[in-house]
Amino acid sequence: MRGVWRLTGAAAIVVIAWAGAAKADTISYADAITVLAKDCGADIKKLCKGLNLGNNRIADCLAQNAGKVSPTCTSTLASVAASIQKREQAQTTYSKVCATDMARRCNGVVGDGYILACLAKKQKTISAQCNQTISDAGWR
Amino acid sequence: MISRKIALAGFTAALLLPALALAQQVSEQRIINGLGKLQGAAPIVDVELLRQEAMNGSGKQMSGLPNWSKVARLPQMVVEIDFANDSVAIEPESYRTLGMIADALHHPNLWAYKFLVVGHTSSTGTDQHNLDLSQQRADAIKEILSTTFAVDPSRLYAVGVGEYFPIEGSKSEAANNRRVQLYNLGVFTRKP
């Protein structure tokens, strides 16, 4: 588990059953952090004044102040975690999952950006797994 | 070499709006397009030299300094990040902008590139204080991108320039406390 989603810390455990039950569409960092800013912004300003997002400082602060953090914030942290994790996983596995399709359908295309564009264009002829991975990675 | 020939118009202009409007104006796609249009090889830029030049270049324009003038030709984008006054702490209202930058840097169009984060400050306070603060702000953004948002830290460089380099077209009184520039420094090659 990397990135934002270490941010969830202890809070994640509390609502994990709920988050697990929800069918997680993947979510971008921007959308994830926006929800966090919206639902936890007041708590952050009140309890973690002067602290930055980096190096888990906000997450640690919210965890230390768990008793004072609003329930909305606590549940947001956890629900957003599930979907962002799925996206990170898709981005990480993309090159492997789509390797066959790249070789078969986009042979000779040079550059990661152009290869992705090629795969996206040939959506109908590439494998379901590769298509799903591109969608989950947030690259459509 | 991934250089996308995507026409791009007015991306900086759209970024000079207040934070909340900004949240709708800056999009991941815009960042990808704005930073991805590197044509040919980027010049070799030495971040340490840039720092030195900024420190010694008091009162000069960016384009008049040998190393900064090279940077000025690279694909760039200006974003506004709201910092608490005289602090490195970023307001939650600006989290979205950081998230979008992260999404863009994780996109295949940009994932082979390294980037320079340039921090600015307002002109209130001493030169040295502003230089230090802008460096700390640039470092804070690098830290957030590389920890919270899982961007490889070796792709990111941070330098603060204090109040020295006004950005063309920006309303300085409104924007100068929160301008952050991103430059595409060219292809990232992992150290062996």
Image: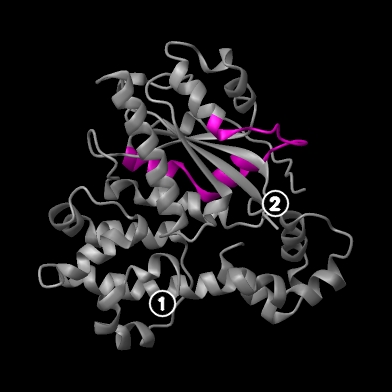
SS for tag 2? loop
Tell me where the magenta segment starts and ends, as one range: B19-48
The image shows residue A133 at horizontal and vertical percentages of 63, 74
Q: In this view, does B86 lie above or below A80?
A: above
- Which residue, given by chain and number where applicable, does mark 1 sit on? A82
Q: Which of these two is toward me, A76 or A1?
A: A1
Rendered-image quadrant of the C terminus of chain B: bottom right
Check the residue under mark 2 and report the chain it is in: B
Q: Residue at x 69, y 76 (%)?
A: A130
* Residue at mark 1 shares a chain with residue at mark 2: no
User: Can you see residue B166?
Assistant: no
User: Can you see residue B68?
Assistant: yes
SS for tag 1? helix
Q: In this view, does A26 lie to the left or right of B21?
A: right
Q: Which residue is drawn at 67% across and 74% down?
A: A131
The extreme left residue here reads A68
Q: Distance between the residues labelled 1 and 2?
A: 32 Å
Q: Which amino acid does label 1 sit on?
A: Ala
The image shows residue B160 at horizontal and vertical percentages of 42, 31
Q: Residue at x 24, y 62 (%)?
A: A39
Is B28 colored magenta in this rendering?
A: yes
Disc 1 versus disc 2: nearer the observer: 2
Q: Is residue A77 above or below residue A117?
A: below
Figure quadrant of residue A93: bottom right
Check the residue under mark 1 and report the chain it is in: A
The image shows residue B178 at horizontal and vertical percentages of 35, 33
Give the numbered dot on residue B189.
Answer: 2
